[in-house]
Image (cartoon, rainbow, N blue to C red):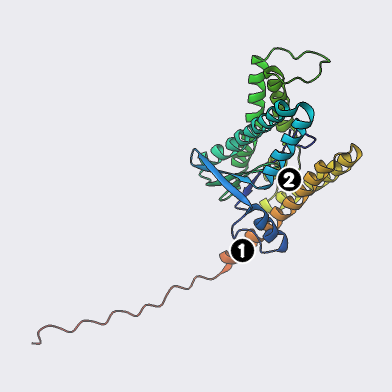
Amino acid sequence: MDRARARSPLSIHSGRFSKSVLAKTTGALLLRHMLGWSMNLFRVRGIQLAVHFSFFLLLGYTAWMGWREERAAGMIWYSLLLVACFTCVVLHELGHSLTARKFGVGVRRILLLPIGGMAEFDSLPRQPRSELLITAAGPAVNFVLAGVLWLLLPPAPVEEAVTLNVLEFGHVLLLWNLLMGAFNLLPAFPMDGGRILRALLVLRWDYLTATFWAATVGKVVAALGIGAAFFFGQPLLAVLFGFIIFVGELEYRTVKRRLAFEHERADWPFVPPRIAPEAEPPPLFRP
């Protein structure tokens, strides 16, 4: 499914992608418009969970693939597996979100897309320790889930065809969480690995320079990913890496404009208002 169905897990936590922090460029407005095609589901610990409408196309396609394999049983099994995999995506994003709230960062919502999940924050902390912990919390959730499943499940039979049973269901989820945790640690900004890289670079450089180099490394990694995706015949994975390049560049420009605005505002001279002294009130009684 998402990862098991020739796609790769993606987690991006953004700093108010859909608000005025974004530069008013064509790319930013396009992204805002695209992310607006969503439907709210419910709240988890006060955090709104939403699903993009394109996700239902994925669900329909997955159900159709199951129908081709095993008719009604396959359709139900494939659909439940997809829902279970994206439940792990939600838990991954909750790892980011709940850790962010510990540092006073507001979380607007978690948005599910066919390529993964996106946690939208009101802001992103610039302290390396805060960003590092918030970012690492997502993959840590996946590795914990994989560890629990590994302890609970018996070993999978070797060289046996995939069957529709609970054991196989659990092993697919175990593999899903391992792949999701590992994939998101790739240094492809703004994915988790790219944000960890930026948090480490901030220890040496200023925030904007660290963001620039994290985004640059991310473009190189994503470009290599696009080449590998086409080599192995995975065009959807190539689209995913292309999206990573687009969003990474967009966030770098957003950080650049935000810091320029803050610098400009700091340079504004403060002119105290001129207040005329109050006139002395006339005496009530004249001598």
Q: Residues within 10 Å of mark 2 (few under 14, many from 20)?
A: many
Compared across the picture, whether 249 is left or right of 95 comes to right
Residue at 78 percent across and 21 percent down: it is 162
Residue at 66 percent across and 61 percent down: it is 23
Asked if 38 appears above or below 89 in the picture, the reply is below
Q: Image quarter for residue 236?
A: top right
Residue at 68 percent across and 29 percent down: it is 76
Task: Looking at the picture, tell me which residue is in the foreground, 202 or 229.
Answer: 229
Residue at 76 percent across and 26 percent down: it is 70
- Residue 121 horizontal/vertical position (percent): 58, 48
**Secondary structure at numbered mark 2:** loop
Asked if 140 appears above or below 273 in the picture, the reply is above
Calculate the distance from the C-alpha at mark 1 to the C-alpha at mark 2.
23 Å
Residue type, label 2: Phe
Nearer the camera: disc 1 or disc 2 = 2
- Extreme residue toward the front, this view: 71
Which quadrant of the rendered structure holds the C terminus? Answer: bottom left
Q: Image quarter for residue 282?
A: bottom left
Q: Which residue is mark 1?
A: 261
Q: Which residue is mark 2?
A: 189
Compared across the picture, whether 269 is left or right of 159 comes to left
- Residue 45 horizontal/vertical position (percent): 49, 38
Task: Looking at the picture, tell me which residue is in the foreground, 157 or 98.
Answer: 157
Residue type, label 1: Phe
- Extreme residue toward the right, this view: 231
- Residue 176 horizontal/vertical position (percent): 72, 28
Q: Residues within 10 Å of mark 1 (few under 14, many from 20)?
A: few
Mark linked to residue 133: none
**Secondary structure at numbered mark 1:** helix
- Residue 222 horizontal/vertical position (percent): 81, 44
Asked if 170 appears above or below 98 in the picture, the reply is above
Compared across the picture, whether 284 is left or right of 55 comes to left
